[in-house]
Amino acid sequence: MNKTLQKNLHDSLVEVIRKTSAELPNDVFESIESGRKQEQEGSSAKYAMNIICDNVEIAKRKSQPLCQDTGTVLFYIHFPMKTDYELLQKLIKKAIVSATKKGYLRQNSVDSITGKNSGNNIGPGAPVIHAEPWKKDTFEIKLMLKGGGCENVGAQYSLPDSRVGAGRDLKGVEKCILDAVQNAQGKGCGPGILGVCIGGDRGTGYAASKEQFLRKITDKNKNPELAKMEESVTREANTLGIGPMGFGGKTTLLATKITALNRVPASFFVSVSYMCWAFRRQGAVMSPKGEIKKWLY
């Protein structure tokens, strides 16, 4: 990897971080706007949605973070097979340090033992990087910034679960998902988006549930049963009266995205990840020279 490619990749990564932090993707903003139109004039829900939309506009105009909690930094990357992956990791971390200095990311990574802030968003497990080589000569970089508030209301269930009356079937899965929404009660900075994984183990289930946030809100699940469940959960959740920020109203969820992994017979996990309205995910395809060719969202 020559010096020019390294510089271009660094600069492109910083721009991906800036855009992710400050600009809500169009599919998300359009869904929020749709929710705002449903809320009653003069209601707390309408007021909350208005504030959210104003915040989105200001953050974009000023290139400032949409939320003071710029969250866990999660990269999902495909890179050419000939790439020095160790060097690519170093470039990613260098870009994070640069973006933090520029104010695109807040100083948000804390040592879990000492409580000390690293000051640059780098440390054990930070950032989170999921990377795979591919045969193309381009780089695909997807980034998600997941705030702590929405991460706190994620949940994992082991079926059967007598507490929520959930058996080992899709009806039981749906009961678990709706229970997670009910328990969140707006604490995840709703309206939210759910990423769900049926099956897998405890680790792979949570990882796969978060990967569902890489889908566009407007897409449709290729599995008919899961597509039906996505629509059913979102529709049902929006009748619970929780609403934006838990203030009541019709917009509790913007969307639900569900996937499934194989499991061992003894285990049946349902992993639910919650994303706040500040749904910060972006991605770009970069040329062999490291320059941004195309935005993905």
Image: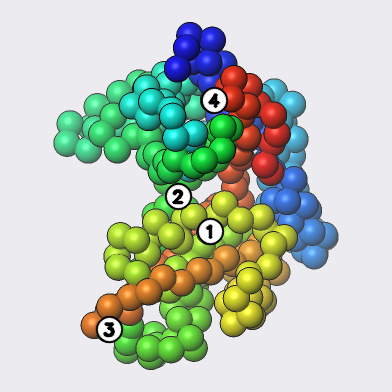
Q: Look at the picture and state if 241 lies above or below 127.
A: below
Whichever of labels 1 and 4 marks the residue nearer the N terminus, that label is 4
Which amino acid type is marked by label 1?
Gln
The residue that disc 2 covers is 149
**Other-residue count near label 1 (Cα within 10 Å), few / some / many at <14 / 14–19 / ≥20:** many
The residue that disc 4 covers is 13
Residue 206's x, y, as percent? 38, 60
Point out the frontmost of discs 1 and 2: 1
Whichever of labels 1 and 3 marks the residue nearer the N terminus, that label is 1
Mark 4, secondary structure of its residue = helix
Residue at the image position 42 percent from the left and 21 percent from the top? 91
Confirm whether residue 67 shows in the render. no
Whichever of labels 1 and 2 marks the residue nearer the N terminus, that label is 2
The residue that disc 3 covers is 265
Which amino acid type is marked by label 2?
Gly
Residue at the image position 58 percent from the left and 32 percent from the top? 138
- Specify the quadrant of the image occupied by residue 219: bottom right
Residue 166's x, y, as percent? 40, 88
